[in-house]
Image: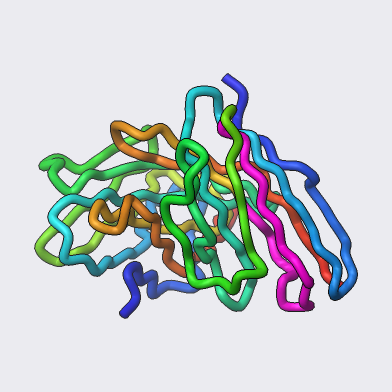
Amino acid sequence: AQKITQTQPGMFVQEKEAVTLDCTYDTSDQSYGLFWYKQPSSGEMIFLIYQGSYDEQNATEGRYSLNFQKARKSANLVISASQLGDSAMYFCAMREVNTGNQFYFGTGTSLTVIP
Amino acid sequence: KAGVTQTPRYLIKTRGQQVTLSCSPISGHRSVSWYQQTPGQGLQFLFEYFSETQRNKGNFPGRFSGRQFSNSRSEMNVSTLELGDSALYLCASRRTGGSYEQYFGPGTRLTVT
């Protein structure tokens, strides 16, 4: 079974609008971390935001927020006020403690911001 | 603080050859992980090193190997290259406490002809 599932291969959003990128995860571990990374066309993976499994509040970092619904095992990324520079691939990832903190990545969502 | 650096950035090799890629982590980061990224398979975990010891290993053949030095720098080696090894190889480092977020280098793009 896939540890991380991203069901949106591609998304489009109008500049200045908000967009939600979906991510669901599968784990039986009680202690885990959820991450979102951005990969522009240059190839470098850029860390965006982190949510711990015991964190009760949703994580926020500037225009990025993580909508964490533990019971549904979802960790959606919300980007507010989209900018042209947000066009990139976005990867959801999970770190499980019981596998030695190994990271698992989803297949990514390609986001295109339209002017 | 300097980021993760990887050398070389681009590499072209011939089938059957071997290649060594290098990664220097962020200062103070003792864990280094390697990933292979291809359009078809996505981002796949190769292995992780911590304090010169391999901590985790992904599902790759023995042609893929790595090591870590006492200064936390890491190298990855691929022997007997195959066309399917063409990929972007990403290195990531992290602290070993706290939120465990990984910071990635720019990658080495390997092309096997």
Front residue of B45 and A48 = B45
**Horizontal arrangement in the rendering, residue A77 relative to residue A67 (left or right):** right
Front residue of B66 and B29 = B66
User: Where in the figure is residue B87, as x and y percent of width and height?
Assistant: 70, 65
**Horizontal arrangement in the rendering, residue A21 relative to residue A91 (left or right):** left
**Horizontal arrangement in the rendering, residue B50 relative to residue B25 (left or right):** left
Magenta highlight range: B72-90
B81 drawn magenta: yes
B51 drawn magenta: no
User: Where in the figure is residue A51, as x and y percent of width and height?
Assistant: 26, 44
Instruction: Kindly identify the residue that appears in the image at 37 percent across and 42 percent down.
Output: A49
Instruction: Kindly identify the residue that appears in the image at 40 percent across and 50 percent down.
Output: A36
B68 to A91, vertically: above or below: above
Quadrant for the N terminus of chain A in the image? bottom left
B31 to A8, vertically: above or below: above
Q: Quadrant of residue B35?
A: bottom right
Instruction: Kindly identify the residue that appears in the image at 25 percent across and 40 percent down.
Output: A59
User: Where in the figure is residue B59, as x and y percent of width and height?
Assistant: 49, 72
User: Where in the figure is residue B13, as x and y percent of width and height?
Assistant: 88, 64
